[in-house]
Image (cartoon, helix red, strand yellow):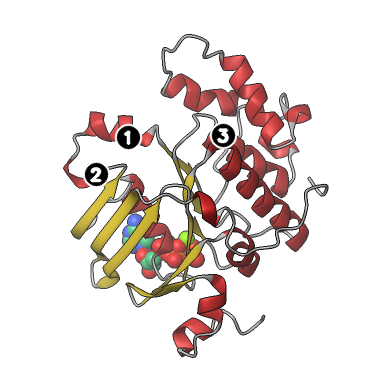
């Protein structure tokens, strides 16, 4: 890792962003009892784009991506993923669509009783695609090489550091080569150097597999290095949107609060 050139721009790969809208969220509403979490949230992600959602703890960021991936059902609004209306899909069609969506959970969510190899094989077994030349062992090796952890293949999660677990989680998320990746707090709980390494890894993998991503974070390194565009989730809505520099220049206190340490 450390050998890669520093990222000169805060709009990584902006030239590769297409016009196709791979995620379109409109007027999304989700409440839990009296707790109105999302109150008309809108978001668009284009092919090849990294969109970051910035919001304080409890603002509904995880709820948003759980709605996008179909783990939570919104009360109102619409979600289109790769041209499909996810709320109208039957469970089988939703399952087929989910193969194209990688989800990196806020905790790495590795299975403690399984080795790294078994953890990586898990999605392959579950969604095994009977394609010729799909060699399970080769995919596991490629995934581990991508995150620089080939030597951890026979280790258990309890034997890994936090940063290593996050990388293995990333390898598992990407092993099915999803078109879309949803990252929930990929750097939270890591030291700044390891966090930056994870951000660089996300960028390299975006480049290698041409993924489109939603990145949930409150890490300004993520904002600066990995986001083509940032949406501020505030009071249940997409309150402000722009590049890192555009948001940083805003005087609106609900946006400015995220940039006070810069
Ligand atoms: N399954 C659930 N049942 C009831 N309430 C929930 C559920 N999931 C989330 N909530 C509530 O929705 C709100 C938003 O939660 P969410 O996990 O999306 O926050 P977040 O923005 O991801 O915060 P953090 O930065 O701390 O991860 C919180 O008030 C939370 O208590
Ligand atoms: Mg969360």
Residue at x-position 54% and y-position 35%: 174
Question: Along the polypeptide, which appears first: circle 2 or circle 1?
Answer: 2
Residue named by callout 2: 86
CA gap, disc 3 and disc 1: 17 Å
Vertical arrangement, residue 236 with respect to residue 194, above or below: below
Q: Residues within 10 Å of mark 3 (few under 14, many from 20)?
A: many
**Where is the N terminus found, in terms of image quarters?**
top right
Mark 1: few/some/many CA within 10 Å (<14, 14-19, 20+) = some
Q: Are marks 2 and 1 in contact (CB under 8 Å)?
A: yes
- Relative horizontal placement of residue 192, taking residue 81 as reference (left or right): right
Relative image position of residue 252 (x, y in whole percent): 45, 89
Mark 3 or 2, nearer chain start: 2
Q: Position of residue 145 (x, y in %)?
A: 71, 30
Q: Quadrant of ligand 1?
A: bottom left
Which residue in the structure is indicated by mark 1?
Answer: 97
Task: Judge by depth and name the residue closer to the eye, 205 or 123.
Answer: 205
Please name the residue shown 27% across and 35% down the image. Answer: 94
Q: Residue 95: x, y in percent?
A: 31, 32
């Amino acid at each position: 890792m450390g050998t890669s050139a520093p990222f000169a721009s805060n709009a990584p790969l902006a030239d590769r962003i297409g016009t196709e809208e791979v995620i379109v969220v409109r007027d999304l509403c989700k409440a839990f009892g009296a707790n109105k979490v999302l109150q008309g949230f809108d978001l668009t992600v284009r092919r090849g784009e990294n969109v970051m959602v910035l919001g304080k703890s409890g603002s509904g960021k995880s709820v948003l991506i759980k709605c996008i991936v179909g783990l939570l059902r919104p009360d109102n609004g619409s979600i289109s993923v790769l041209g499909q209306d996810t709320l109208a899909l039957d469970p089988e069609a939703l399952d087929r669509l989910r193969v194209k969506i990688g989800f990196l959970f806020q905790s790495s969510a590795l299975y403690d009783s399984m080795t790294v190899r078994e953890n990586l094989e898990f999605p392959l077994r579950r969604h095994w695609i009977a394609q010729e030349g799909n060699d399970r062992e080769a995919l596991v090796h490629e995934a581990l090489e991508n995150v620089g952890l080939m030597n951890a293949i026979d280790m258990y999660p309890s034997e890994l550091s936090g940063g290593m677990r996050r990388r293995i989680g990333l390898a598992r998320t990407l092993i099915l080569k999803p078109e879309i990746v949803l990252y929930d707090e990929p750097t939270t709980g890591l030291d700044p150097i390891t966090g930056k390494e994870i951000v660089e890894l996300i960028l390299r993998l975006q480049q290698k597999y041409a993924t489109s991503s939603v990145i949930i974070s409150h890490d300004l390194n993520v904002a600066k290095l990995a986001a083509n565009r940032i949406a501020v989730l505030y009071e249940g809505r997409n309150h402000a949107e722009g590049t890192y520099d555009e948001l940083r220049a805003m005087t609106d206190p609900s946006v400015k609060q995220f940039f006070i340490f810069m």
